[in-house]
Image (cartoon, rainbow, N blue to C red):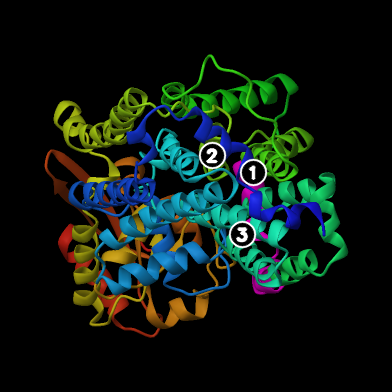
């Protein structure tokens, strides 16, 4: 029997026996790790669902964009695979446009990460090490403060964590069901975000390099994983080709090649420094349980050595692969792109520090963990409540999107007697109008073209017309040149102001009337009557 499968029953021997030898307190031994785990996850999910639900009055930019895409139910979009827009559209439709479901979906993603890390930790080390591995994740910036923004980065996290857990089951147990599930999760992860490929590629390299894992290539399991992942991802692959690789091109535009090596390496070092900074609270938490002075730990078994190598590959492989790809292509990565690659950092630390399980250490750790949990939440509250009071400027989270949509929709219906089917403009203003309008129109973002929004065509605009929307404070009350060039028949409407607390927003509007609708002339006459001048038809 192969060493990996033959030693599955004693997999926990190295770390678990060490923990027993190092235990110094009866209370630590009787600690209900399962209950602590469940309570910690519940606290995180409730805290980061309730706070944004209470404090954020408007959808964020990412959610607005996802809702505009998801409403169309395409196999892909100009920037991302479709799973994130689909889920965003589904959960907001279910809640009647209430955004709390988006915040809950985001935290459920984080909760699934915690669960997958817990399950893997219990397999390879023990329940207490698994618990510490999960709790340490709360000390990583990417798992708390940014998570109310439900986006593709957050959505990739549960797939990455579940893949790491299931692949370990597949490599050690060699059951076809685990191989198949690993492939399913890998494929779905790619539907969430392309950077799931960093996990897939780095763990494929691990399987090729590690002698015990490499033996599995002689069986059907790994090939079932590959086949399943390809079949799951195939529809989106077909869309990528049919669309002319627009989503792949977008990734390149977001991380353009640096013109000079000095500039590239400066930005790469900035990226690495940002990741180290994101880990500092976690490392501070880990130091509170670190066994600074002790005898050498018992030598791990073959299974233990395999597990150590596996966790190290999960913790460092994806980000190392991403950095290597960056160096090869000379494209510096963006800071937030590392967020889904940190899922196993806590477990790696927990299985290396040989924790001290004394009552004093555990109490200190618990108090510090509460600080790490609550401090980002406090900063979040101050950001949303205190900052506008001090500066007088509100964030987009307080933008009057509902007022914008209601005003544009009512004007359109008054002019045409028709439902508003299309809005055109920048992502923020057109996206808000598209989501909050009772007519729920489709959006065509002005930075792109019909190629990026195939659900809109010139013929459809001729039949149904559209409302053009822009920021009049930045671009003026007249139709912006970029929109005027694309839609020369648009009829300028009076600009209007929106107020939210101390903030005032100036909104420009123009109507592209249906070609066969005589109301185009009526709308023009109304504008002439109100201004004393002929309307601007472009």
Residue at image location 53% in from the left, 25% down from the top:
276
Packing grade of label 1 (10 A; few <14, some 14-19, many >=20) is many
Q: Is residue 421 magenta?
A: no
Q: In the image, residue 274 lies at what x, y percent?
A: 52, 26
| Vertical placement of residue 320 versus 68, above or below | above
Label 2 vs 3, first from the N-terminus:
3
Which of these two is toward me, 186 or 213? Answer: 213
Say whether residue 105 is visible. yes
Magenta stretch, main secondary structure class: helix
Magenta highlight range: 231-254
In-image side of 336 versus 233 (left or right): left
Rendering coords of residue 290 (x, y %): 48, 22
- Of tags 2 and 1, the one toward the viewer is 2
Q: How many marks?
A: 3
Sooner in the amino-acid sequence: mark 2 or mark 1: 1
Say which element carries label 2. helix
Can you say whether 270 is above or below 335 in the image?
above
Mark 3: give few (<14), some (14-19) or many (20+) Cα within 10 Å: many
Q: Say if mark 1 contacts mark 3, CB within 8 Å.
A: no
The residue lying toward the viewer, choosing from 60 and 526, is 60
Front one among 327 and 399: 327
Q: Residue furthest right?
A: 218
Quarter of the image for the N terminus: give it: bottom right
Which numbered disc flags the more N-terminal residue, 1 or 3? 3
Drawn side of residue 513 relative to residue 436, left or right: right
Indicate whether 466 appears above or below 130: below
Residue identified by numbered label 2? 347
Residue of label 3: 166
Q: Is residue 416 above or below residue 34?
A: below
The alpha-carbon separation of the residues under discs 2 and 3 comes to 16 Å
Residue 337 coordinates in the image, percent (x, y): 56, 41
User: What residue is pinned by disc 1?
Assistant: 314
């Amino acid at each position: 029997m192969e060493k990996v499968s033959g030693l599955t029953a004693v997999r926990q021997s190295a770390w678990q026996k060490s923990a027993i030898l190092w235990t110094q307190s009866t209370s630590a031994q009787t600690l209900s790790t399962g209950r602590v785990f469940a309570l910690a996850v519940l606290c995180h999910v409730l805290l980061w669902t309730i706070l944004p639900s209470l404090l954020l009055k408007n959808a964020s930019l990412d959610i607005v964009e996802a809702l505009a895409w998801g409403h169309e139910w395409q196999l892909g979009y100009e920037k991302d695979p479709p799973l994130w827009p689909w889920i965003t559209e589904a959960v907001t439709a279910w809640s009647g446009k209430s955004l709390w479901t988006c915040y809950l979906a985001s935290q459920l993603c984080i909760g699934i990460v915690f669960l997958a890390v817990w399950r893997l930790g219990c397999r390879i080390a023990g329940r207490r090490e698994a618990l510490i591995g999960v709790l340490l994740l709360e000390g990583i910036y990417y798992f708390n403060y940014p998570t109310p923004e439900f986006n593709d980065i957050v959505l990739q996290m549960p797939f990455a964590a579940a893949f790491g857990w299931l692949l370990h089951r597949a490599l050690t147990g060699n059951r076809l069901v685990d191989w198949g599930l690993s492939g399913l999760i890998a494929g779905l992860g790619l539907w969430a975000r392309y950077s799931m490929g960093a996990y897939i590629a780095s763990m494929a390299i691990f399987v090729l390099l590690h002698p015990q894992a490499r033996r599995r290539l002689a069986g059907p399991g790994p090939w079932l994983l590959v086949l399943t992942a390809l079949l799951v991802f195939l529809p989106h692959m077909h869309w990528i080709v049919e669309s002319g690789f627009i989503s792949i091109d977008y990734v390149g535009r977001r991380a353009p090649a640096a013109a000079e090596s000095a500039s590239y390496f400066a930005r790469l070092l900035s990226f690495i420094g940002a990741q180290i900074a994101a880990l500092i609270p976690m490392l501070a938490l880990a130091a509170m349980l670190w066994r600074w002075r002790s005898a050498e730990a018992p030598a791990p078994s073959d299974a233990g050595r395999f597990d150590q190598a596996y966790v190290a590959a999960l913790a460092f492989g994806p980000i190392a692969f991403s950095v290597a790809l960056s160096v090869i292509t000379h494209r510096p990565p963006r800071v937030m792109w590392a967020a889904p690659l940190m899922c196993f950092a806590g477990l790696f630390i927990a299985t290396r520090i040989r924790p001290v399980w004394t009552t004093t250490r555990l109490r200190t750790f618990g108090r510090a963990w509460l600080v790490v949990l609550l401090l980002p939440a406090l900063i979040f509250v101050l950001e949303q409540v205190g900052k506008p009071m001090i500066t007088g400027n509100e964030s987009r989270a307080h933008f009057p999107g509902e007022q914008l949509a209601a005003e544009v929709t009512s004007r359109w219906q008054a002019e045409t007697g028709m439902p508003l089917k299309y809005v055109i403009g920048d992502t923020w203003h057109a996206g808000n109008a598209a989501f909050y309008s009772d007519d729920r129109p489709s959006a065509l973002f002005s930075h792109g073209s019909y190629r990026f929004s195939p659900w809109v065509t010139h013929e459809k605009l001729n039949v149904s017309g559209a409302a053009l929307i822009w920021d009049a404070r930045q671009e003026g009350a007249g139709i912006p040149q970029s929109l005027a060039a694309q839609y020369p028949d648009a009829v300028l409407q009076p600009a209007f102001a929106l107020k939210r607390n101390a903030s005032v927003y100036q909104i420009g509007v123009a109507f592209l009337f249906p070609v066969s609708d005589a109301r185009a002339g009526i709308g023009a006459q109304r504008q002439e009557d109100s201004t004393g001048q002929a309307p601007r038809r472009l």
